Image (cartoon, helix red, strand yellow):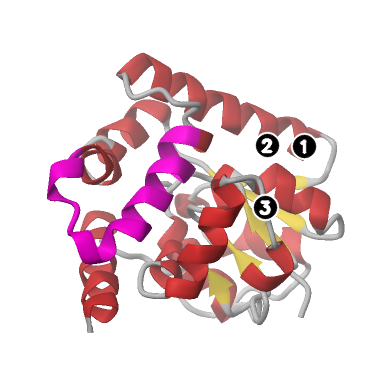
Amino acid sequence: MALEIIGAGFGRTGTYSLKAALERLGFGPCHHMSEVIGDSEQVRLWTAVTEGRPDYASIFTGFRSAVDFPVAAYWRDVLAATPGAKVILSDRDPEDWYGSFSQTILPLILDKASWPDDRRAWFEMIDKVVIGKALSGRKDRDGILSAYRANAAAARELAAEGGALVFRARDGWEPLCRFLGVEVPDEPYPKTDPRAEFFASVKSGIEETAG
């Protein structure tokens, strides 16, 4: 199964809702960090990506779409490996995004003293993916925002050429369905509690790994 949709939007930009939407539209399963957390093989494969040994064919076997981290940090590389795929930038105001990111993903990564030894491989991989790749090693507010804006700018440039969609959850089904060439469902666009979903997915994934 070839990957058809690549998400360029960083985590905390409505990626969980986008995952649900894509699966509702028939583009599932959708790869998302929630699948990676409890899967030791995915952790191993993404660790290899951070070390310059990508095997995207294995990572995305069985998936039709991929959003959120880790793919958002490598979306241009993944697109080069699957040139027929469509790109979706899940977008959010930079300041709003930083407010959420700085209270969820960032402290989880930076508090290395709290990383449990039996799950250290996942935390180390995420550190390399998010801080090392997506944020170019920056941990300060200005550097993080600069990396976020640069990533969005690259996706917007592709969108201007017709190769990507810039999308916000508040836009609803219509622009997403038009871009993908499918009918609009007769139901509300998926809505989640972003912060609650984030911590629930982390907790669930870690418990599965521990089990």
Disc sitting over residue 22 in the figure: none
Magenta span: 111-132
Q: Residue 101 sits in which quadrant?
A: top left
Q: Residue 12's x, y, as percent?
A: 37, 47
Q: Residue 42's x, y, as percent?
A: 51, 69
Disc sitting over residue 53 in the figure: 3
Q: Residue 208's x, y, as percent?
A: 27, 80
Pointer 3 and pointer 1: residues touching (CB < 8 Å)?
Answer: no
Q: Which of 154 and 189 is in front in this view?
A: 154
- For the N terminus, the quadrant is bottom right
Residue 167 appearing in the image? no
Q: Which residue is drawn at 72% across and 53% down?
A: 78
Amino acid carrying mark 1 in the image: Leu
Label 3: element kind: loop
Label 1: element kind: helix
Vertical relation: 191 (above or below) 86? below
Pointer 1 and pointer 2: residues touching (CB < 8 Å)?
Answer: yes
- For the C terminus, the quadrant is bottom left
Disc sitting over residue 155 in the figure: 2
Of the two numbered discs 3 and 2 on the same chain, state the one appearing first in sequence: 3
Q: Residue at x 28, y 39 (%)?
A: 106
Amino acid carrying mark 3 in the image: Arg
Q: Which residue is drawn at 43% across and 47% down?
A: 13
- Real-space CA distance between mark 1 and mark 2, rounded to the nearest whole angstrom: 5 Å
Location of mark 1 (residue): 158
Q: Which of 168 and 76 is in front in this view?
A: 76
Residue 79 in the magenta stretch? The answer is: no
- Real-space CA distance between mark 3 and mark 2, rounded to the nearest whole angstrom: 24 Å
Amino acid carrying mark 2 in the image: Ala
Label 2: element kind: helix
